[in-house]
Image (cartoon, rainbow, N blue to C red):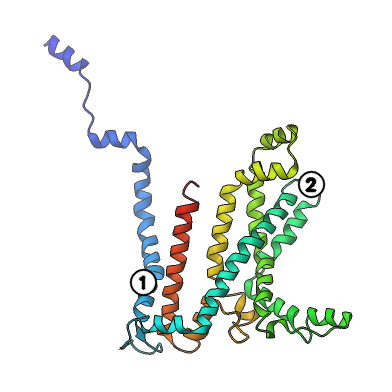
Amino acid sequence: MANVSAATAVRPLRVPATASARRKHPAVSGRLPVLLLFLPPALLLFSVFVILPMGEAAWYSLYKWDGYGLPTQYVGMRNFELLFKNGAFLTALKNNAMIMIISIIIQIPLAIWLAMMLAHRIAGVVLFRLIFFLPYVLADVAAGLIWRFVYDGDYGLFASIAHLLGVETPYVLADKDLAMYAVLGVIVWKYFGFHMMLFIAGLQSLDKSVLEAAEIDGASGWQRFRYITLPLLGSTVRLSVFFAVVGSLQLFDLIMPLTGGGPFNATQTMVTFLFNFGVARMQVGLGSAVGVVLFLICVTLAFGYKRIFMRHD
């Protein structure tokens, strides 16, 4: 009996696999009640307000429907054929591409330049940050109305400047060749502050000793920016470009009070085209087709960009 007792005492106890796994991964067992409590409501809301509307839009795009009753006139891919034969929609695609390019090659470099000047803790820097960030805080509709008055050829700021200079007043928003460039200027003014704050946060998180070492070694300001600051800001730059690309495809609130997509559809974007030709004209099938095309473009660009450029971030 003594030998048996000693062997029993020496032999290690067998711990059940589930208990052992829980001890190895305590976070999993502690997180499970939270997941069971909060995940089903979140999935339900996401399904009702995102998945279901996307499925309905894809279904409606196959019908010629005015929004009343149930869609019954099945037309297949006819809405998509009409869409890509519509000159206003092709203009909207071109405008979205133009907004995307301008956001990347003008708005983001401008934001980096200002962030480099305002990242240091000097007197008055907070005031300048607030001034440059204020346009982004302003509501898009309010910004559109303000700039519509600024561009007004009769009573706006441009008209006053033209009268002072003694030149003919330009009607910028009424000129189909100039209206889109006026909109692009407003877009840069409106959103560069958001990207500037991203870069300021990124600059403040950099290791200052690396820059100081480069300065001691005789590197110029441009060399420090080109070979040290910009590479260290790589993840922030990629994130900023991602926001610019996705935001340029969803532009609506700023365009509608500013031009409404005119003149002669010169400033249409895909979302304003969806509203003007789908909702306002009660062509829900055609509008749903626009939504499907916009969704596919957004998903392709977003996931493709993250897969190619942000896979290590």
Which residue is painted at 77% across and 56% down in the image?
A: 127
Calculate the distance from the C-alpha at mark 1 to the C-alpha at mark 2.
51 Å
Residue closest to the eye, 104 or 111: 104
Residue 10 in the image: x percent, y percent? Answer: 21, 15
Q: Residue 97's image quarter?
A: bottom right
Task: Describe residue 229's horizontal placement relative to residue 38 as left or right.
Answer: right
Task: Bin the neighbour count of mark 1 within 10 Å (Cα to Cα): few under 14, some 14-19, many 20 and up.
Answer: few
Q: Amino acid at mark 2?
A: Ile
Of all residues shown, which one is farthest toward the top?
Answer: 2
Does 302 sit above or below residue 160?
above
Residue closest to the eye, 54 or 241: 241
Quadrant containing the N terminus is top left
Task: Bin the neighbour count of mark 2 within 10 Å (Cα to Cα): few under 14, some 14-19, many 20 and up.
Answer: few
Q: Which residue is mark 2?
A: 122
Residue 67 in the image: x percent, y percent? Answer: 40, 87
Q: Is residue 137 visible?
A: no
Which residue is painted at 52% across and 84% down in the image?
A: 276
Q: Which residue is mark 1?
A: 52
Q: Amino acid at mark 1?
A: Leu
Q: Residue 96's image quarter?
A: bottom right
Residue 293 in the image: x percent, y percent? Answer: 43, 73
Does 61 sit above or below residue 21?
below
Residue closest to the eye, 305 or 281: 305
Does 57 sit above or below residue 236?
below
Q: Which mark is residue 142?
A: none
Which residue is painted at 22% across and 33% down in the image?
A: 16
Q: Is residue 78 visible?
A: yes
Numbered disc 2: secondary structure: loop
Residue closest to the eye, 28 or 197: 197
